[in-house]
Amino acid sequence: MKPVFNRPPLTANDTAMLSPGRIRPEGWLGDGAKNALSALRSAERAVRESAIDLKTCEFYRDLGLLSATLGDEDGLSCTAEFIERLKATRKENGFFGPEDGCDLSAQFECLDLLLEYFACTTDRSALEMIDGFLRWEYLNLKKRPLNGFSAYRSGENIYVALKMYDLSGQKYLLELCALLRGQSFDWVSEFNTFPQIRSMSEAMPWKDLEKGLKQETERGKGRYTELLMRTHGVNVAMALKTPSLLGLIRPGFRETQAFSVGWSKLLRLHGTPNGVFSCDELLDGARDAGTLTNAAAETLWSLAVLEEIDETNREIPSAFEKIACNLLPAMFSGDGKAAQRLQTSNQTRIVTGKENYYNGPESGNSFVSVDSDPFALNGIARMWAYAARGLWYQTSDGGLKAASYFPCVLAAVTDGVRIRVRVDGGYPFSDEVTIGISAEKETEFPLYLRVPPWAENPVICLPGGEIMAVKAGETTCLRQKWDKRSLVRLVLNTRARARTLPGGLMGIMYGPVLMALEPAQGEDASKLRLTEDAPTKTVNDTGSWRDFKTLVKLRDETNQQVTRTLTAYAFTEKRICAFVQAKTEEHDA
């Protein structure tokens, strides 16, 4: 399917996301995606006979997304069978799926699944189901307003409605978006003011909130329910894109600035060293309290959508890369069959239970396998597909834009000419990127290359041998003719450096990569300290991203300087990545 750009009166966009499957992940990203898909395929038989509810809808959306991303026909066939089951629940008025009062969270998952399925198969029956349900909403939501989680996750609904408007131009869809806005939690105001300045542990102990929720069960929503919903990590993650989506319909200063203001405050008040925010399950301050990994997945998707809407915001791709290359691989076991529901940055042990968490899942930060629970990867496995979708975009002037350089192969069509782009180099665990461009015939189109802000004296080596100096943090446009064997090389000259992390701790960053110490068995590494100017040296003798290491000088409890080897956070299970900062006088001494 061709990339879809906004129709008037929506605000025009210069970049559009490519269909699932147009960007095929390779290298470390591809290996992880294949393992996750294999795990879902092994669990699908156990899920096949399950009732259609939120968990089942989440499972098949994960399966459908990964199957489309990797071009797996068997996985797509299983997804198609589930869609047929959905069709069997469809009523004459267009409603489908489980009846759960006015909480439409399961339907929102299915709408996304149907839209993504159409984008990779062009099966118009999927569009018919979406249109029928959206028309049901348009006619019935005034009598049956949104309730429960769906009132806080309506951005998912609005996203699909806007995509349908871009495809069909039907005016009722814009009116439906206005109706959804009026029935939903006001995330525009929430992110502009961001009142959640305290951790939930400090603001209200879980036992008090739980008691209040029980009292409100019979009479419906109240202040305890709203507090739960507005601080729930997955709700917040999904809502990050909502103000900008609303701004496409009715542009305004508050909608435009909501993400930047809210994201900045969210990271300052609740940020974690690995690039996301603490939520176990509710926002719990800038401390290493743990993060719901499905909240991290939804944050990544929100950032990918925001890159399409607000392509000039430089913090979006940087945040996207940090989450994708750190949390994502660390969420999964080596074979991809098990995943964490909670992940902590300084993760020195794996435990089952709610120990040290606000109200996290009973599984704690343990790895739960699909062998014991077929829904173990729900809402998490899709993150591999999200990471691929956010790498490249098509531009309104017929060009291609790179937001990141994770290994992948891209298939696109520009001006009627088929283009294939291969990205090699193992980024971000390497500071050189090779971009091979193959056009079926010589053609001219612009190639937009984002230069990451952490690059030092970056250069681009052009196909003709010319070397072009570029600025870190900016996007460079290469407008020239491309043939069957055009090669572009981006040299970033990245160095590992000590950086201040949320919570006032220090860590070593190599570009977006967070480095971590894997303590030896029985070792207490919690007393090691890091200075702002700690000497570092990065080595990779084999060229494999798993052998990527950084040597760093730390201070032990006696203030002696010791050299330790750090590995990429992404490929650790037990680790310390956030260190107490050594005082200046200690360092000088």
Image: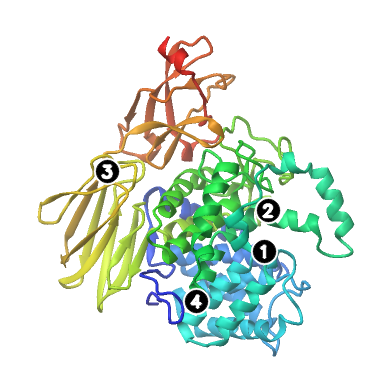
Check disc 3: other Cα within 10 Å, few if <14, some if 14-19, many if 20+.
Answer: many
Q: Is residue 318 above or below residue 418?
A: above
Find out whether the residues at labels 4 and 1 contact each other: C-beta distance under 8 Å: no
Q: CB under 8 Å between callouts 3 and 4?
A: no
Residue topped by disc 2: 232
Viewer-nearest residue: 22 or 36: 22
Q: Secondary structure at mark 2?
A: loop
> According to the image, label 4 marks what residue?
163
x and y, in percent, of residue 548 in the image: 37, 35
Q: How is the image coloured?
A: rainbow
Q: Which residue is mark 1?
A: 152
Q: Is residue 51 left or right of residue 76?
A: right
Q: Secondary structure at mark 4?
A: helix
Indicate the position of residue 195 as horizontal and vertical percent values.
66, 51
Circles 2, 1 touching at the beta carbon (< 8 Å): yes
Between the residue at mark 2 and the residue at mark 1, the CA separation in whole angstroms equals 10 Å
The x and y percentages for residue 528 are 52, 19
